């Protein structure tokens, strides 16, 4: 082993230097992540061993990916974290519960994988308080998916924890993309020749040597292994060289040749070790004994060169394991897996036992299939959706009865879908539809197929498929049917293509029989949405008001399940207070659960609601959080809040670039909600800049898309712009639509916006009381930007009526509000109007003592700390470790020239 490591480091000076710099950085309190990747045998493991040997005084945590464990959820993560489990009680309770659940230490609700990631981040941060930590994952290409997702998340969030996380892998998996990387390639010709000459005792013909170096591409393991096959006579003049082939296959063939020359007991021992994924020597020997294999006959010098039996069973190279396993006859593999199953304690490790039994089964086996189904249930309870899907897929293959196979196939399809494996989900759905013996099962299979279409983003395919699934489910499970109708409605509203699907779904909802007993929140939302599309706002408002009240106490599981659709009921009835409260709670529920798949949707809604109150610093913090979530998940979402925020701020260059980029990206991606939001933002921006002729077409694009919220909110922008350029017909058409949408809603928000818009199109006698009512109504809300705009429009109208003194009062009020909020373009518009009344007004300049020099993330951290949150609490909300929060705080203190948390209350403005 020593020779192998030294051989693997020949010619690796630059790679070793990279690793040495990483260790040095960690010693000084920095964090690092690195993906070391290259072909099999190229020397990755040797570099990892060098890294570990260099880490004197650093705590080393190690895990190894095992090919046969890829279906066992969190297996690799558990290896890595076992030495730290005594620190679990020090974590925040939700994080402690999450790790204890996925590691099988307790029963509980399956945690979101991002909550698990945050818990691991906190665990490593806590461990690093005692000194630097080096985490190494070798053979990372064989990590189970759950571990890969969590560790990829952790690697991206490391910043100031004195933690290094290194992955050694043949290929960069999806979950590790974007991390810093070190590619390990073959040795240069000179180093390769030197290594070959060291390994081959006889003199080599120069041409033969060069051919071997070329064909192995300088791969150290290939040079060492292939040299074993050669004799002086075989390489003389190049005659008798082994045939060319792919490099991994040639290395594996070299190992295979050595294995085939071993005695039968030794070959069987290697097969048992290869089939046992944990590397537990006691378990290997126990299983081997059942096959009649004993140490005295199986352990030879040749075996010792291929595998070692120490604290763990360690193969010389993963290709030895694969060669030993793949070379065995099928009946030998089944016998070995059966022996391992019998040697595995069913109480301690029932899942691994079931997995061995599955590989031991020669054909359908209902008893094993049932055991695999139970393993799937345990995996789902730990949050291991990929593992559950794998267990169920194997269970389907071993099920003889078609009806039972179809039932399990539906479950496998659903688990695969939730694990993000759409291809496997489709395959299982095919089996379910083929074998289903009853219509209910076929309907459930169709539902999964519909959800696959929605998850795959297949444009307009998903809504009609979900509608068909809901109809098919009605005779069997009305509750599931209703939830499916709501999913279909939400999908149609989100895609917002032409409105035909939304209308068809809404009509189907209207035809549903009334629910038995007291309507549940889902029933109220569903009925209200159906009425909203088929009968209009007036008919829907009474039902949607009841839905709004019910949504305030919606159980967390429903918030995560369908709240993203239901929460729109608040906006549909123009209840801004309920909107903010509902969105705040929904975001909190998603954060607490680590549900980063739905959190961006709630953050978008909360961000818009926050921007509407004029709390631009709060909105910027939400933007920073949303961007952090998108980075963590790798799933982009249209920047709804940032669009509206930059438009209201009047940042023309930044807003225009963001608007154009969003329209281009969202249009290509089929996210028409993004296109709608971008054009709404454009209309707001150009109205603030008094470029009304540019606001009109942008607003018209938004109202032309079959969408029920933004397409309404943009109507006041279109009315204002059209009136200013004399397009009264366009303005009146927009006012008719706004009256239909806001008229039935007797809220101060709805009536304030409606009266403000009516005033723009009214004569001199009618306009003034409408403006006054708008100001009174909006003054009772927290929508400061809308109140300021009402003051501006009234002041502009008064000036045009030659009532300069009265105009100054309202224009000054508008100007001061715009300045305090940060709406610079509108403030400039109000300033110009004030100048026209004869009043002198200085241009607004930014206040230097508001924390503007902070980044959005720093401002968000500062706000939370100012509100009294501890570092762990801030970290839990922002998916950062406590030490990273502390690192940011030091930078914040330096920028603001303060020295304590208490001083944040003084240096940050109240709105910040």
Image (tube, rainbow, N blue to C red):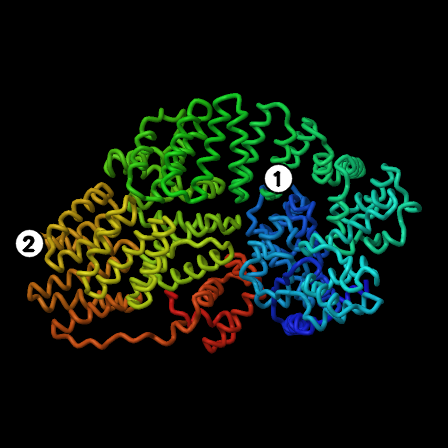
Is the residue marked by circle 1 packed among few (<14), some (14-19), or many (20+) residues within 10 Å?
A: many
Q: Are marks 2 and 1 in contact (CB under 8 Å)?
A: no
Q: Nearer the viewer, residue 445 or 239?
A: 239
Q: Which of marks 2 and 1 is nearer the N terminus?
A: 1
In the rendered view, tell whether residue 377 sits above or below residue 191: above
Q: Residue furthest right?
A: 296
In the rendered structure, the answer to whether residue 136 lies left or right of residue 767 reads: right
Toward which corner of the image does residue 451 lie, by quadrant?
top left
Residue lying at 41% horizontally and 70% vertically, measured from the top left? 908
Q: Nearer the viewer, residue 504 or 43?
A: 43
In the rendered view, tell whether residue 151 sits above or below residue 535: below
Instruction: State the image coordinates of residue 10 (x, y, percent, origin top left).
Output: 73, 70
Instruction: State the image coordinates of residue 587 (x, y, percent, origin top left).
Output: 45, 51
Q: In which quarter of the image is the C terminus?
A: bottom left
Which residue is disc 1 drawn over? 390
Q: Is residue 59 visible?
A: no
Give SS at disc 1. helix
CA separation, marks 2 and 1?
A: 73 Å
In the rendered structure, the answer to whether residue 902 lies left or right of residue 363 reads: left
Residue lying at 66% horizontally and 70% vertically, measured from the top left? 15
Give SS at disc 2. helix
In the rendered view, tell whether residue 550 sits above or below residue 722: above
Which residue is disc 2 drawn over? 765
Q: In which quarter of the image is the N terminus?
A: bottom right
Q: Nearer the viewer, residue 109 or 2?
A: 2
In the rendered structure, the answer to whether residue 241 lies left or right of residue 759 reads: right
Residue lying at 86% horizontally and 47% vertically, measured from the top left? 262
Can you tell which of label 2 and label 1 is closer to the viewer? 1
């Amino acid at each position: 082993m020593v020779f192998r490591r030294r051989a693997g480091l020949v010619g690796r000076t630059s790679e070793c230097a990279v690793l040495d710099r990483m260790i040095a950085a960690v010693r000084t309190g920095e964090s690092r992540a690195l993906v070391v990747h290259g072909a099999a045998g190229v020397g990755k493991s040797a570099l990892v061993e060098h890294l570990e040997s260099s880490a004197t005084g650093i705590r080393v945590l190690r895990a190894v990916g095992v090919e046969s464990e890829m279906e066992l959820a969190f297996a690799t993560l558990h290896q890595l974290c076992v030495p730290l489990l005594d620190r679990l009680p020090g974590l925040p309770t939700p994080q402690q519960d999450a790790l204890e659940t996925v590691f099988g230490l307790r029963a509980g609700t399956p945690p979101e994988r991002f909550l698990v990631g945050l818990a691991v981040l906190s665990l490593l941060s806590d461990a690093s308080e005692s000194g630097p930590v080096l985490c190494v994952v070798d053979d990372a290409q064989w990590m189970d998916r759950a571990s890969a997702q969590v560790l990829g998340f952790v690697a991206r969030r490391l910043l100031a924890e004195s933690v290094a996380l290194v992955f050694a892998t043949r290929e960069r998996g999806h979950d590790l993309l974007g991390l810093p990387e070190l590619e390990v390639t073959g040795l240069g010709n000179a180093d390769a020749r030197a290594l070959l000459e060291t390994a081959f005792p006889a003199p080599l013909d120069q041409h033969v040597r060069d051919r071997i170096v070329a064909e192995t591409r300088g791969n150290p393991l290939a040079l060492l292994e292939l040299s074993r096959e050669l004799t002086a006579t075989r390489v003389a003049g190049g005659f008798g060289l082994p045939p060319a082939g792919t490099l991994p296959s040639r290395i594996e063939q070299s190992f295979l040749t050595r294995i085939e020359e071993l005695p039968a007991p030794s070959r069987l021992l290697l097969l048992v070790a290869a089939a046992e994924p944990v590397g537990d020597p006691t378990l290997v020997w126990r299983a081997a004994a059942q096959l009649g294999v004993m140490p005295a006959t199986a352990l030879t010098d040749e075996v010792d060169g291929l595998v070692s039996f120490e604290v763990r069973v360690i193969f010389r190279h993963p290709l030895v394991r694969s060669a030993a396993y793949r070379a065995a006859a099928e009946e030998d593999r089944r016998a070995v897996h059966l022996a391992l199953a019998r040697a595995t304690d069913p109480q301690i490790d029932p899942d691994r036992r079931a997995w061995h039994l599955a590989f031991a089964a020669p054909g359908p086996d209902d008893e094993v299939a049932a055991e695999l189904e139970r393993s799937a249930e345990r995996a789902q309870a730990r949050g291991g959706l990929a593992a559950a899907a794998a267990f169920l897929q194997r269970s389907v293959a071993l099920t003889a009865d078609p009806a039972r196979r179809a039932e399990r196939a539906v479950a496998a399809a659903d688990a695969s879908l939730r694990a993000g494996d759409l291809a496997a989900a489709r395959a299982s759905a095919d089996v379910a539809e083929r074998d289903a013996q009853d219509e209910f099962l076929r309907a459930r299979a169709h539902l999964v197929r519909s959800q696959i279409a929605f998850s795959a983003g297949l444009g307009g395919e998903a809504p009609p498929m979900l509608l068909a699934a809901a109809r098919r489910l009605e005779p069997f499970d009305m509750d599931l049917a209703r939830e499916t109708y709501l999913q279909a409605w939400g999908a149609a509203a989100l895609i917002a293509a032409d409105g035909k699907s939304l209308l068809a779904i809404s009509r189907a909802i209207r035809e549903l029989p009334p629910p038995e007993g007291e309507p549940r929140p889902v029933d109220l939302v569903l009925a209200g949405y159906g009425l909203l599309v088929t009968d209009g706002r007036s008919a829907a408002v009474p039902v949607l008001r009841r839905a709004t009240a019910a949504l305030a106490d919606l159980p967390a599981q429903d918030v995560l399940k369908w709240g993203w659709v239901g929460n729109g009921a608040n906006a549909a009835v123009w209840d801004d207070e309920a909107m903010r409260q509902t969105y705040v709670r929904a975001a909190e529920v998603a954060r607490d659960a680590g549900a980063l798949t739905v959190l961006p949707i709630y953050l978008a809604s909360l961000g818009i609601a926050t921007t509407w109150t004029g709390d631009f610093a709060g909105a910027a913090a939400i933007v920073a959080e949303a961007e952090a979530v998108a980075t963590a998940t790798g799933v982009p979402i249209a920047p709804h809040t940032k669009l509206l925020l930059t438009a209201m701020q009047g940042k023309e260059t930044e807003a225009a670039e963001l608007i154009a980029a969003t329209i281009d990206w969202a249009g290509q991606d089929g996210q028409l909600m993004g296109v709608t939001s971008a054009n709404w933002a454009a209309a707001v921006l150009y109205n603030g800049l008094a470029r009304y002729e540019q606001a009109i077409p942008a607003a018209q694009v938004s109202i032309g898309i079959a969408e029920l919220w933004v397409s309404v909110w943009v109507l006041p922008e279109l009315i204002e712009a059209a009136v200013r350029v004399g397009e009264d017909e366009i303005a009146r058409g927009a006012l008719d639509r706004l009256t239909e949408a806001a008229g039935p809603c007797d809220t101060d928000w709805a009536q304030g916006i409606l009266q403000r818009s009516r005033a723009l199109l009214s004569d001199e006698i009618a306009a003034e009381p409408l403006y006054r009512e708008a100001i009174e109504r909006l003054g009772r809300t927290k929508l400061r930007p809308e109140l300021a705009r009402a003051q501006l429009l009234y002041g502009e109208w008064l000036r045009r009526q030659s009532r300069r003194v009265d105009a100054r009062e309202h224009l000054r009020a508008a100007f001061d509000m715009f300045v305090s909020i940060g709406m610079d373009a509108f403030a400039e518009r109000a300033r110009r109007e004030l100048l026209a009344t004869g009043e002198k007004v200085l241009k607004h300049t930014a206040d230097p003592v508001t924390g503007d020099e902070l980044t959005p993330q720093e401002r968000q951290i500062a706000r939370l700390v100012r509100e009294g949150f501890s570092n762990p609490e801030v970290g839990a909300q922002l998916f950062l470790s406590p030490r990273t929060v502390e690192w940011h705080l030091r930078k914040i203190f330096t920028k603001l020239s303060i020295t304590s948390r208490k001083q944040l209350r003084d240096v940050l403005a109240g709105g910040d």
